[in-house]
Image (spheres, grey):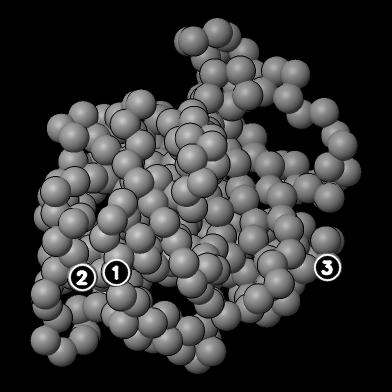
C-alpha cells in the first residue's frame, strides 16, 4: 500500500504516466525511520523538506504542516502493519503539465513504507571497504545539499562499487575534495578532531549528520569542525564513518591499504541509541 495525496491505495496504482519527478527529476524527497509509531527526528525532516520545496520553487499547500505530514506517514506505515520499526519515503513532485517549464507549481506526494528488522541502530557490517568514485563529480551548489529525485551519480557509483567488490564509494566535488558517501555523510577522526565537510562543499545537509555533530560536541576532549577533506587526508585518518538516518552509523574499516579502528563510532552509536530509548 502507498499514500497518494492522502489516500491509501494499492502500490500497483499507476502514478507515473505524467509524473514530473519521473519525467524530469522534478521532485524532492525525505526518507524517515519510524520506531514504535514515532518518526525519529521528525522536525528536522519536516523543515528540510520545506526548505527543499522552496529551493526548487514548489508551492507549499497551507495544510502541509508537520502534524499533517506525520499523520500521512503513520497512516501508510500502519496500513502496512510496520509501525514497530520501518522506513518511509515521502516524494513530493510538481503536478502534471508543461515540459521543462511547468504550467504551475502545485504539488502532489507519494509515501511508501517498508518494515525494518531492527529497532535500534547497529553496525550493518564489521568489515566495510570503500574507495573513491571519480567518474562523475558533485557540484558545489545549493541543489547538491537537498534530496532531489535526480540521484544518477549515486546510482552509477553504486554500480561501480558492486562491480569492484566495494561496500561503498566516496564522492568528490568539482574541486576534487571528498564530499560524502553514496548513501550518507562522511566523518573523519584525526587525532582528537572530528571533521565533516561543510554543506557549502556540496554535501547533503543530512539529518543524521546534524545529530552526530550535536552528540560529538558534548564529548570531552573532542573538537568537532566542518572542514574540507582531501583524498590525501583519508590515509592519515584514525577513523572514518558514514551516517544516515536509516542505518545510523557505519564505520569504514578499509580504504585502499589503510585500515581504521571503530572506537569513536561505537561510542557515538551507543549515545544515538540512548536517544531512541528515551523517546
Q: Where does label 1 land, which residue?
A: 260
> Picture quarter containing residue 243?
bottom left
Provide the residue designation for mark 3. 81
Q: Nearer the viewer, residue 261 or 271?
A: 261
Q: Is residue 33 above or below residue 263?
A: above
Q: Residues within 10 Å of mark 1 (few under 14, many from 20)?
A: some
Residue annotated with mark 2: 238
Residue depth check, mark 3 versus mark 1: number of the one nearer the observer: 1
Residue at the image point whose x is 40% and y is 45% from the top? 169
Q: Please give the name of the residue rendered at 82% of the width and 28% of the height, measured from the top-left corner.
A: 14
Q: Which comes sooner in the sequence, label 3 or label 2?
A: 3
Q: Nearer the viewer, mark 3 or mark 2?
A: 2
| Between 212 and 11, the one nearer to me in the picture | 212
Q: Which one is in front, 59 or 99?
A: 99
Mark 1 and mark 2 in contact (Cβ < 8 Å)? yes
Judge left or right: residue 174 versus residue 115.
left
Spatial CA distance of label 2 from label 1 is 6 Å
Label 3: element kind: loop
Give x and y (percent) for residue 132. 32, 42
Proximity of marks 3 and 2: CB atoms separated by less than 8 Å: no
Q: Position of residue 56 (x, y in %)?
A: 40, 30
Q: In the picture shown, does residue 196 fall above or below 99?
A: below
Name the element at disc 1.
Answer: loop
The mark that comes first in sequence, 3 or 1, is: 3
Q: Badge 3: how crowded within 10 Å, few (<14), some, or many (20+)?
A: some
The x and y percentages for residue 18 are 70, 18
Query: Quick one: label 2, few (<14), some, or many (20+) residues within 10 Å?
Result: many
Q: How many marks?
A: 3
Report the disc number at residue 79: none
Say whether residue 35 is left or right of residue 155. right
Amino acid at each position: 500500500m502507498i499514500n497518494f495525496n492522502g489516500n491509501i491505495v494499492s502500490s500497483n496504482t499507476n502514478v507515473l504516466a505524467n509524473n514530473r519527478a519521473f519525467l524530469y527529476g522534478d521532485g524532492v524527497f525525505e526518507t524517515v525511520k519510524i520506531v514504535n509509531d514515532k518518526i525519529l527526528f521528525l522536525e528536522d525532516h519536516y523543515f528540510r523538506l520545506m526548505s527543499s520545496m522552496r529551493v526548487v520553487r514548489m508551492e507549499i499547500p497551507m495544510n502541509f504542516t508537520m502534524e499533517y505530514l506525520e499523520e500521512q506517514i503513520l497512516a501508510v506505515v500502519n496500513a502496512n502493519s510496520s509501525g514497530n520499526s520501518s522506513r518511509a519515503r515521502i516524494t513530493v513532485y510538481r503536478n502534471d503539465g508543461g515540459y521543462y517549464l511547468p504550467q504551475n507549481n502545485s504539488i502532489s506526494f507519494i509515501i511508501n513504507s517498508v518494515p525494518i528488522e531492527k529497532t535500534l541502530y547497529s553496525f550493518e557490517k564489521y568489515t566495510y571497504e570503500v574507495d573513491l568514485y571519480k567518474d562523475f563529480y558533485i557540484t558545489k551548489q545549493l541543489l547538491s545539499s537537498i534530496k532531489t529525485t535526480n540521484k544518477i551519480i549515486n546510482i552509477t557509483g553504486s554500480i561501480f562499487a558492486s562491480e569492484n567488490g566495494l561496500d561503498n564509494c566516496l564522492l568528490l566535488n568539482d574541486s576534487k575534495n571528498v564530499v560524502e558517501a553514496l548513501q550518507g555523510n562522511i566523518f573523519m577522526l584525526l587525532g582528537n578532531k572530528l571533521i565533516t565537510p561543510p554543506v557549502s562543499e556540496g554535501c547533503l545537509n543530512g539529518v543524521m549528520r546534524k545529530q552526530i555533530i550535536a552528540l560529538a560536541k558534548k564529548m570531552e576532549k573532542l573538537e568537532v569542525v566542518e572542514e574540507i577533506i582531501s583524498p590525501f587526508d583519508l590515509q592519515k585518518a584514525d577513523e572514518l564513518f558514514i551516517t544516515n538516518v536509516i542505518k545510523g552509523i557505519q564505520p569504514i574499516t578499509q580504504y585502499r591499504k589503510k585500515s581504521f579502528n571503530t572506537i569513536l563510532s561505537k561510542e557515538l552509536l551507543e549515545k544515538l541509541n540512548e536517544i531512541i530509548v528515551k523517546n
